[in-house]
Amino acid sequence: MDDRPPGEWSRRRFLSAAALGGAGAAFGLHSAAAQAEPPPEVTTIRWVRSPAICVAPYYVAEGLLRAEGFTDVRPFKTEGNTWTQDVLAGNVDLVLNFVGPLLLRLDAGDPLVVLGGVHVGCFELFVTDRINAVRDLKGKTVSVPALGDAQHVFLASIVANVGLDPRKDINWAIHPRAEAMQLLAEQKIDAFLGFPPEPQALRAKGIGHVVVNSSVDRPWSQYFCCMAYTRRDFAQKYPVATKRALRAILKAADICATEPDQTAQFLVDQGYTPRYDLARQAMREMPYGKWREFDHEDTVRFYALRLREAGMIKSSPQKIIAEGTDWRFLRELRKELKA
């Protein structure tokens, strides 16, 4: 008999289900709580497809959504730096992404709500041998894909945390991520912030060295990196659907934490990334199992303070929390999905 709590997957169940093939068969088990709830108000939900594998729980959750009553899961292909815009445009209903760019949109008054944090860490700051600490980036060239995207916002938070002004002290260079990695190897830029599988690839090639690893270095390792969010009207009109979708993501985070090798194979099989070795390393390094432990509201407060110090938002953390968060679903699910 499996003596784990309801809703938690055993290794045997995961492997036997995975053998059936397909995300729905591999991850789509009904929980008793889900069966006791009303069905979702809508059975169609729009979900993102993107090459960012650090949000693996979001991709694993796609199969679980069917067990939650969503009969039509519609994938929408996008890049990581447009997720928030895609939610606002109605192309996607609920996403998991770095909280920084979301706070910029909440500061601007966009009708979005944060539902909960899912995983800690994932970004790593790689630098050349000219740099020994974050403070050494003053006056140096740092590459990001676009101003306002996840990498730019997180880097702005990092440099602001050590007293630098990201608006004046950093020379921002705009390059696609693959090009930026090559420029770092050639020492034509001074720093690059990567997310999985980029850090794993850079280490494998011996390119640069890391001065900040948000999975293990304080203060970043004490706060969620990526949080789930949706449009305010979606959460208000479809509370059952919102809770069920969030439950799928949180259960998927547990799968990623307990079965990193199988999750890596799933990411490769589903076409999210081509290299199993890098995906496996990333899944083993990522702290996916901490969503029950950390204070979700503290993450919003922490990053709102950093971004306010950086001059990127004007709203107080209290205002953003009051107007841009909805923790009711998370509170219910933390009780339901106890470890």
Image (cartoon, rainbow, N blue to C red):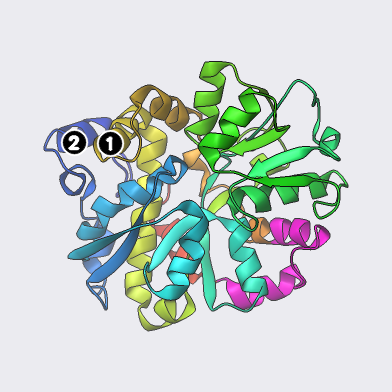
Q: Main secondary structure of the magenta part?
A: helix
Q: Quadrant of the N terminus?
A: top left
Residue 186 at what x, y percent from top left?
65, 23
Q: Residue furthest left?
A: 20
Q: Quadrant of residue 316?
A: bottom right
Residues drawn in magenta: 301-325
Q: Quadrant of residue 122?
A: top right
The one of 236 and 335 positioned closer to us in this rendering: 236
Amino acid of disc 1: Phe
Residue 73 at what x, y percent from top left?
24, 62
Distance between mark 1 and mark 2 Cα atoms: 9 Å
Amino acid of disc 2: Ala
Mark 2 packing: few (<14 Cα in 10 Å), some, or many (20+)? some
**Residue 240 in the image: above or below residue 209:** below
The circle on residue 45 is none
Do the residues under discs 1 and 2 have CB atoms within 8 angstroms?
yes
Residue 308 at what x, y percent from top left?
79, 63
Q: Residue furthest right?
A: 163
Residue 304 belongs to the span the image colors magenta: yes
Give the structural element (helix, strand or loop) at label 1.
helix
Q: Quadrant of residue 195?
A: top right
Give the residue drawn at x 32%, y 71%.
241
Residue 81 at what x, y percent from top left?
52, 55
Please name the residue that numbered disc 2 is placed on.
18
Going from N to C along the chain, the mark reached first, 1 or 2, is: 2
User: 319 left or right of 119?
Assistant: right
Please name the residue that numbered disc 1 is placed on.
266
**Residue 80 in the image: above or below residue 128:** below
The one of 318 and 335 positioned closer to us in this rendering: 318
Give the residue drawn at x 40%, y 56%.
78
Mark 1 packing: few (<14 Cα in 10 Å), some, or many (20+)? many
Residue 315 belongs to the span the image colors magenta: yes
